[in-house]
Amino acid sequence: MKFGVIAYKDHQLNENAYLTRIQPLTDEAKAIEFIAGLTSDGGGDICEAVLDGLHQAVTHAEWRSDSTKFIFHIADAPPHGKQYAVPHLEDDYPEGCPCGIKLEDIAKVMNEKKIRYRLLDIVLDPRKFNEKYRKAIEASNQGMKKMISVFSHYFGNLENKQLREAHEVTSAVTQFIVTDIAKIETSPLI
Ligand SMILES: [Zn+2]
C-alpha cells in the first residue's frame, strides 16, 4: 500500500503560505513524517484552494491503473466560487479558482480513474467559539453542505462523512477502508 499527501491552503500567498504542498506516493512512515511537518496557519477569507488540491491529487499522483485508489479529502471549508456561497461566507474569488481550475475537469479524471473519493467534512460546533468566529464557523459549515451537494452531481464515486472533531479522522478513514474493501470483494469495479 502506498500513501501520498496533498496539503492545500489558499491563493493569497504570504511568506509562510503555499498553494499546495505535495508528498508523492510513498510508504506510510514517510507520509506521516510529511504530515507532521505541516502547519495550519494564515487565514484571510473562509474559502480555500480546494480545487487546486484536488486537481493535484488526481493528476499528480502516479496512480497504477490496476490499483484500488482512494482520495481521503479532509476539509472544513468550501472552494472559491459563487455556487458555494452562503451568508457570511467570505470569498475573495467569487468567480472561482483564479488559476482557472474547473470542477468538471477534476471530476472527469477522477471518474475515469475510478478513484473512490471519500470526503471527511469537519463540522465544528459554532457554540464552542466566541462571537467573533461563530458566524464564520456557521458559514463554513453551511458552505460545506453546499459543496457536497454540488460535488455529488459531478463525482460518481463520492461518499462523505461528518466529523465533529479533527481527531475523528483516523477512525473515519478506517471505517471507509473496511466498508470499501468488503464491497470490492463482492463487486470489483464499483
Ligand atoms: Zn487556484
Image (spheres, rainbow, N blue to C red):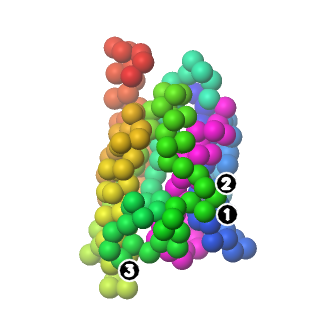
Q: Amino acid at mark 3?
A: Tyr
Residue 151 is labelled as: none
Q: Amino acid at mark 2?
A: Arg
Question: Does residue 58 appear to the left or right of 181 in the view shown?
Answer: right
- Whether the magenta-drawn stretch holds residue 42 is answered as yes
The answer to whether residue 21 shows anywhere in this view is yes
The picture places residue 75, in percent across and down from the top left corner, at 45, 56
C-beta proximity under 8 Å, tags 1 and 2: yes
User: Disc 1 on helix, strand or loop?
Assistant: loop
Q: Nearer the viewer, residue 27 or 14?
A: 14
Q: Residues within 10 Å of mark 2 (few under 14, many from 20)?
A: some
The picture places residue 113, in percent across and down from the top left corner, at 53, 28
The picture places residue 171, in percent across and down from the top left corner, at 38, 43
Q: Is residue 112 above or below residue 66?
A: below
C-beta proximity under 8 Å, tags 3 and 2: no
Residue 21 is labelled as: 2
Quarter of the image holding residue 127? Answer: bottom left
Which residue is farthest right? 15
Mark 3 — residue? 133
The answer to whether residue 77 shows anywhere in this view is no
Mark 1 — residue? 18
Mark pair 1, 2: CA separation: 7 Å
Q: What's the magenta region?
A: 38-62
User: Disc 3 on helix, strand or loop?
Assistant: helix
